[in-house]
Image (cartoon, helix red, strand yellow):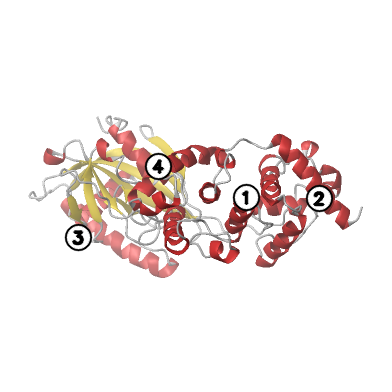
Amino acid sequence: MGLLEQKRHFSVNLLDWYMVNRRDLPWRRHNNPYFTWVSEIMLQQTRVDTVIPYFNRFIGNFPTVQALAEAPEEEVLKNWEGLGYYSRARNLQAAARQVMELHGGEMPQDKQAVFALKGVGPYTAGAILSIAFNQPQPAVDGNVMRVLSRYFLIDEDIMKGSTRVLMEELAGELIPEGRARDFNQALMELGALVCTPKAPHCLTCPVMEQCSGRIAGRELTLPVKTKAKPPRPEQRLVAIVEGRGAHRGRVLVRQRPATGLLARMWELPHVLAAPAAAGKAAGPLADEPAMALLAGSLWAEGFAARPEGLATHAEHVFSHIVWSLQVYKCTEQDQSNELPLIAAEARAAYDAQAATREGTAASSAVSPESAKSPSEPGTPHAQNISTSLNDGELLAPSDVSDQALSTLTGKGDGLTYRWIGPEDMDKMAFPNIFLKLISSYFAGAYDDVNE
């Protein structure tokens, strides 16, 4: 069979299979360009099953481009909380404002105009134009490149830009006239359900008869893909500071800087632990020096707190960093006291850590907002929490009006701090790991620390 016949076999059989086997997904029930756009942004690096409830809630709260464009940024981020890659949400809202300003609130149908929207790359532009407007535009992502690599026995590294161009040209040639909407979704569906990365279901594949990769016995070695650099291990010490007096029943949180990793999101205070040797993960710090270091970092920010004991270990996985966290329950102290049991050793530990941090930043180009970390063993009384939330940015300054949420500025890094109660969790956006830790605290999970 020649190449032309192989292409025809692929297109015809794939479409026939899709029309019978396609999943009923909420964004497929309408040819609404906005729904298509939102779903494609959410589906980047995220599984369909995870996206469905987020999509339904997001569309319920922001049903139109105008509603998204006019919403407070923190509200958008709260609706995205836990989905990961938070820069997607900020870019989506920025692009919605572009659509309002430049296109009267209607999604443009011109390829260059769609591509010009913030956060929209070649794949997303192709998906919007083909699915929403049935334009014969290729939509090539990792799933599609895997399918095409196997079916056409393509040995080119899919991490190379030249390979993506080749794949886009090939995918464009495969689109049957007038069937772009169904064909591109069929191609995505085949990659998601049948031609999977590690265990492709070749016997149920609608195009298996002419799959060159299967015939050559290469279905498990394709596509060719350069291995990504493994994420950098980092270690941090985290404080759950329990308030007293006017702050009783509340915990101390802070807002991250306006730019960079997890920008403007809220978190528990945490500090870089001792750096690891180059290329290795650092082991957990012993509790005594760890608590002294943590108290010292809070002292430098203008907060007196006494660590009471280890509450839990946790892990937070970004695309390029892995945080291993030692989480300590702490108690707010009266700053008017000298805190003889904390101050001297804490300041010494903090000063030593600051010097170490400067040296680490200079030698390894790790920013002060990152840290070296380990794979952490458990302890007899510690729980373990693990999340895989991917890195991003976000959140405009919160508009929480509760008078009890006093806003403070740290002395050392200038970050914004607040005391919050459980009722405030619905008003502020947290990375998933800190959302879990704070929710666990308010649920009483750490009440027995050092009892």
Q: State the image quarter where residue 246 is shown.
A: top left
Q: Rounded to the nearest whole Å, what is the CA distance between mark 3 and mark 4? A: 38 Å
x, y percentage for residue 146?
A: 70, 51
Mark 1 or mark 2: whose residue is earlier in sequence: 1
Give residue 61's mark.
4
Quarter where residue 272 is shown: bottom left
**Percent coordinates x, y for residue 103 in the rendering:** 48, 61
Q: CA distance from mark 3 to mark 2?
A: 61 Å
The reply to whether residue 360 is visible in this rendering is: yes
How far apart are the alpha carbons under marks 1 and 3?
Answer: 52 Å
Helix, strand or loop at mark 4: helix
* Residue at 72 percent of width and 57 percent of height: 224
Q: CA distance from mark 1 to mark 2?
A: 28 Å
- Where residue 352 appears, as percent x and y from the top left, is 28, 61
Left of 277 or right of it: where is 339? Answer: left
Residue contact at pointers 3 and 2, CB within 8 angstroms: no
Compute the Cα span from label 2 to label 4.
45 Å
**3D distance between C-alphas at marks 1 and 4:** 23 Å
Residue 451 in percent (x, y) is at: 24, 29
Residue 285 visible in this rendered orientation of the protein: no
Q: Which residue is mark 1?
A: 131
Which residue corresponds to the image point at 30% horizontal and 40% vertical from the top-left?
Answer: 425
**Circle 3 residue:** 411
* Tag 3 and tag 4, C-beta contact below 8 Å: no
- Residue type at mark 3 is Lys
At label 1, the amino acid type is: Ile
Q: Is residue 244 left or right of residue 20?
A: left
List the residue tagged with mark 2. 213
Residue drawn at (39%, 49%) of the image: 67
Could you tell which of marks 1 and 4 lies nearer the N-terminus?
4
